[in-house]
Amino acid sequence: MIRNLAKIVINNGGSISPLIIPAELTSGTGLCNVSLFEDKGEIIASIRHVHYSLYHSEFGQKFYNKWGALSYLNPEDDMTLTTGNYLCRINPNTLEVDTFQKIDTSKNDIKPIWEFVGLEDVRIFKWDDQLYVCGVRRDVKDDGEGRMELCKVDWTKDKAIELTRDRIEVPNHTYLEKNWMPIFDMPYHFVKWANPIQVVKCNPEDKSTQEVKEGTLSIISSETVIKKGKKLDLPRGIRGSSPVILFGDYRICITHEVNFFHHPGYKKDAFYYHRFMMWDKDWNLVSLSKAFSFMDARIEFCCGLLVKDNNFLISFGYQDNAAYLMKMPTSLLTEMEWEDDYPYNFKP
Amino acid sequence: MDRLKKYLNLYINDPYDAYVNAELGEEYEKIGQGAAALSYFLRAAELLHEQDKEMTYCCVLKTWKQLNITKRRPEYEKEQLQTAVAYLPNRPEAYYHLSLIYSAKEEWKTSYMYACLGLHFKDTPVLPYDVGYPGDYMLTFQKAFTSWYIGQREESKELWLELNKLKNIPKKYKDIIETNANSYKK
């Protein structure tokens, strides 16, 4: 397994940049899970700011804190895990943050009643020339039910305002919908599941409302429009991560998977992995990389993927505490480890 | 940003170099990115805990320091300092910060105890990174301060007078020391 993709990248013509929002705005707590979009040649990003620092004692786990080897260090007088999001313009040369604005969500906020507060793991994109952010929100019902929410954003030089907030309902009740991967070239479509492929379409015109304890939600419907292929026998379930983007005649994305386990102290621990996954235009799986890590940490999460000038731009969070943007020459796909038996195998 | 990028690249080339992890943590701390600093200092501590005790202890204290700067995590702070003490009890820095925690809570005997414990280990070599330890004189300061509250007023007086003879103490502490010492001269 490639545990350190970044090493291959920086030693073969690529680079990596830290993405920073000033500590005066964040109290130094975590920045992570960055998503990317190219808008008229300009790279824009959404950076997740979590109001906690993640404590993860990874190795011999000699340094547990009070809450274990893996814990969220949220304010002890505020037990919520709260997220805010910054929209950023990325310097095309340095791939660092040039400008940023926190998304003002006050127009649509209702009093949160669950412990995960805010729109989590946002992906940023334009569909039909409208800027959207889309992530999971879990704070509107007292059981923490999560749904993807599609939000129009008005972003100018001075402000970023969430104009609308539509909660995407599913035909049959589930507890949690998250990490749907927006398909950049197919407006209102997401890859909901990747193994086997399941594409859903949300219907922004099919609106309704739902009364909840603290307010009224705007609801839009969704439906499954593509479902094909056989489930691959993989060691862990494949979950969404980056958006799905065009790559030549194909569509490509980065997925994630998690191994949850209990460490020797019998508390919850986790190990995240990622893969490249590619389909043809008919959603036949044509390539599947083996699992990899970006920077040899156990908790990493990728939300951003673009192709620009023969490079992938890949953004990811490191232990929820730090955010990075990696420029990876697309030719380095040959350096990845690939699962056999797929027609488009990048092995040289 | 250049130094941060330098150590980020060094880290990527060898994520198991604990000293590079610590340098990267330090660069993040310098720009206030405490969460990122926490990640790399904790990793450094874990990688080194069987090889370099003083550096490991320093890095554990750095994991305390990041949230001390962020604030609003008092239980975490206390336990992380206790983790440092448990790991290497023969250094003064964690005792000093524990003494501060308890004097802020007006738990004078506990604060005094930690000041006394720390003073047992004064004159140790300086740690590789700043962990907010001004010097051994501040343990004496804490002991002078807290002893007054636990009925040891003569001891408190002697300590303030002893502190007042020291040179090169930052003005903010020197002013307090002089005020207390002078009160005994009247």
Image (cartoon, coloured by chain):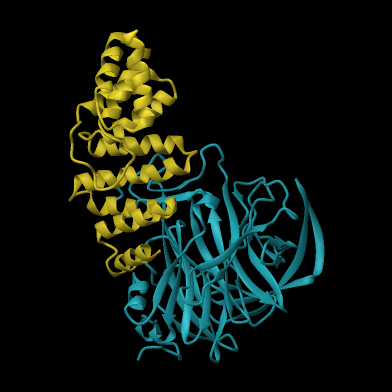
Chain colours: A cyan, B yellow
**Quadrant position of the N terminus of chain A in the picture:** bottom left
Image: B66 above or below A198: above
- In the image, B123 versus A178, the foreground residue is B123
Residue visible at 39% across and 79% down?
Answer: A14
Point out residue B179 in the picture as x, y percentages from the top left corner: 38, 18
Number of labels in the image equals 0
- In the image, B114 versus A279, the foreground residue is B114
Image: B34 above or below A278: above
- Residue A145, by quadrant, is bottom right
Is residue B81 something that shows in the picture? yes
Q: Is residue B37 left or right of residue B17?
A: right
- In the image, A171 versus B48, the foreground residue is B48
- In the image, B106 versus B166, the foreground residue is B166
Q: Is residue A138 left or right of residue A51?
A: right
Is residue A60 something that shows in the picture? no
Point out residue B128 in the picture as x, y percentages from the top left corner: 24, 48
Residue visible at 37% across and 86% down?
Answer: A334
Point out residue B92 in the picture as x, y percentages from the top left corner: 25, 33
Image: A325 above or below B108: below
Point out residue A143 in the picture as x, y percentages from the top left corner: 64, 48
**Residue at the front extreme, as displayed:** B186
**Quadrant position of the C terminus of chain A in the picture:** bottom left
Residue visible at 47% across and 80% down?
Answer: A312
Q: Is residue A224 left or right of residue A179?
A: right
